Image (spheres, rainbow, N blue to C red):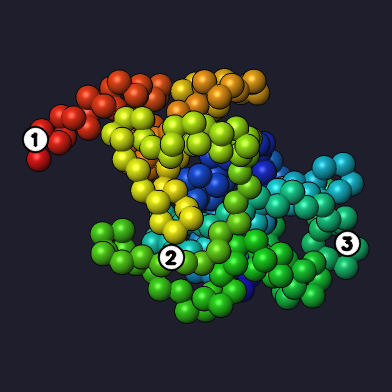
C-alpha cells in the first residue's frame, strides 16, 4: 500500500469531498511539478490517501481515505474517507519536513514505520481484512460490498428520553394517525414524533404537547416531506391507501 498526500482547502470542501467519495480537485502550484497528476495516474485500489496541510510548524491530517475502486483511465476514483483531525510534527527523518515548501507529495516507502499512517487508515476506514481482496462491482450490478465498518462523525439534535417515555404512556403506546399498537414481550413498537422538527428549531424547550406517538410507518411518512406531513395529512394518506387496497 502506498500513501499519497493531497492539499486540504477547508471544512466546506472537506465535507463535499467526503460526501462525494472523491479526490480533491487538481491545484496549480507555482514552481512545483507532478504534485497531482503523478499520484492520480499511479493510484491503485487499496492505496491510502492523506488529506492534510501544514499549519504553522505542525503537519495536520484532516482526513484519511482508501481507494475503493477506479476506472482504468482514472476518470472516476471512489475513495472511502473518514475525518481524523490529527496533528503530526514535521519529522527530520522523512517527508513531513517537505510540508514547509510543498503542497503535495507521495509519502513512501514504508510509512507505517515512519508515521504510523497504515494503522491510522486501517483504524478509521476499517477495511483491514478485505484490503487485498476487495470485490469491486459495477454500479449496475445487483450486488455490492457491505458490512465493513465506516467511521462517521455525526452531530445530531439531542432528545430527552424521559419526555418521550411520558408521551408514549400518555398515548397508550398507540399511533395517533392509524391507531396501530403492537407489543412484543415487554417492548412496544412505537415512535415519538416532534411536531416541530428539532433540525429546524435548533436548541429549544420541548413540552410534552410538542410530541406525538406515531408507528414506524406513519413516522416515516411524516418525514417524507420538509416540513413534515401533519397528523391530519398522514391520516388522509393512510385512509386513501386502505381504500385503494
- How far across and how far down the image is residue 14, in percent? 61, 41
Q: Quadrant of residue 232?
A: top left
Please identify the quadrant where the N terminus is shown.
Answer: bottom right
Residue where numbered disc 3 is placed: 91
Of the pair 86 and 99, the residue shown nearer to us: 86
Q: Is residue 4 visible?
A: no
Residue under pointer 1: 244
Q: Check disc 2 and report its element: helix, strand or loop.
A: loop
| Mark 2 in CB contact with mark 1 (< 8 angstroms) | no
N-terminal label among 2 and 3: 3
| Residue 201 badge | none
Q: CA distance from mark 2 to mark 1?
A: 37 Å
In the rendering, at what x and y percent does residue 111 appear? 74, 71
Q: Earlier in the sequence, mark 2 or mark 1?
A: 2
Left or right of 204? Residue 191 is left
Q: Residues within 10 Å of mark 3 (few under 14, many from 20)?
A: few
Please name the residue shown 35% across and 43% down the image.
181
Q: Please tell me whether mark 3 sits on a helix, a strand or a loop.
A: loop
Residue at left offset 59%, top offset 74%: 128
Q: Residue at x 60, y 51 (%)?
A: 152
How far, Cα to Cα, is label 2 from label 3? 37 Å
**Residue beneath label 2, please?**
146
Amino acid at each position: 500500500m502506498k500513501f499519497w498526500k493531497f492539499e486540504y482547502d477547508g471544512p466546506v470542501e472537506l465535507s463535499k469531498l467526503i460526501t462525494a467519495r472523491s479526490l480533491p480537485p487538481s491545484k496549480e502550484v507555482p514552481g512545483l511539478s507532478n504534485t497531482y497528476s503523478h499520484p492520480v495516474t499511479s493510484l491503485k485500489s487499496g492505496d491510502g490517501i492523506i488529506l492534510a496541510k501544514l499549519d504553522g510548524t505542525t503537519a495536520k491530517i484532516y482526513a484519511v481515505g482508501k481507494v475503493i475502486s477506479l476506472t482504468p483511465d482514472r476518470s472516476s476514483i471512489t475513495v472511502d474517507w473518514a475525518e481524523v483531525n490529527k496533528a503530526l510534527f514535521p519529522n527530520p527523518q522523512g517527508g513531513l519536513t517537505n510540508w514547509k515548501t510543498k503542497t503535495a507529495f507521495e509519502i513512501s516507502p514504508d510509512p507505517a514505520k515512519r508515521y504510523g499512517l497504515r494503522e491510522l487508515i486501517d483504524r478509521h476506514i476499517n477495511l483491514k481484512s478485505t484490503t487485498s481482496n476487495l470485490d469491486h462491482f459495477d454500479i449496475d450490478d445487483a450486488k455490492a460490498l457491505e458490512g465493513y465498518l465506516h467511521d462517521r462523525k455525526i452531530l445530531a439534535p439531542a432528545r430527552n428520553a424521559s419526555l418521550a417515555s411520558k408521551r408514549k404512556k400518555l398515548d397508550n403506546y398507540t399511533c395517533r394517525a392509524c391507531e396501530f399498537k403492537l407489543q412484543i414481550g415487554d417492548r412496544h413498537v412505537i415512535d415519538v414524533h416532534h411536531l416541530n422538527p428539532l433540525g429546524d428549531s435548533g436548541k429549544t424547550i420541548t413540552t410534552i404537547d410538542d410530541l406525538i406517538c406515531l408507528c414506524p410507518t406513519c413516522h416515516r411518512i411524516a418525514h417524507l416531506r420538509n416540513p413534515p406531513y401533519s397528523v391530519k395529512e398522514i391520516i388522509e394518506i393512510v385512509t386513501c391507501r386502505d381504500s385503494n387496497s
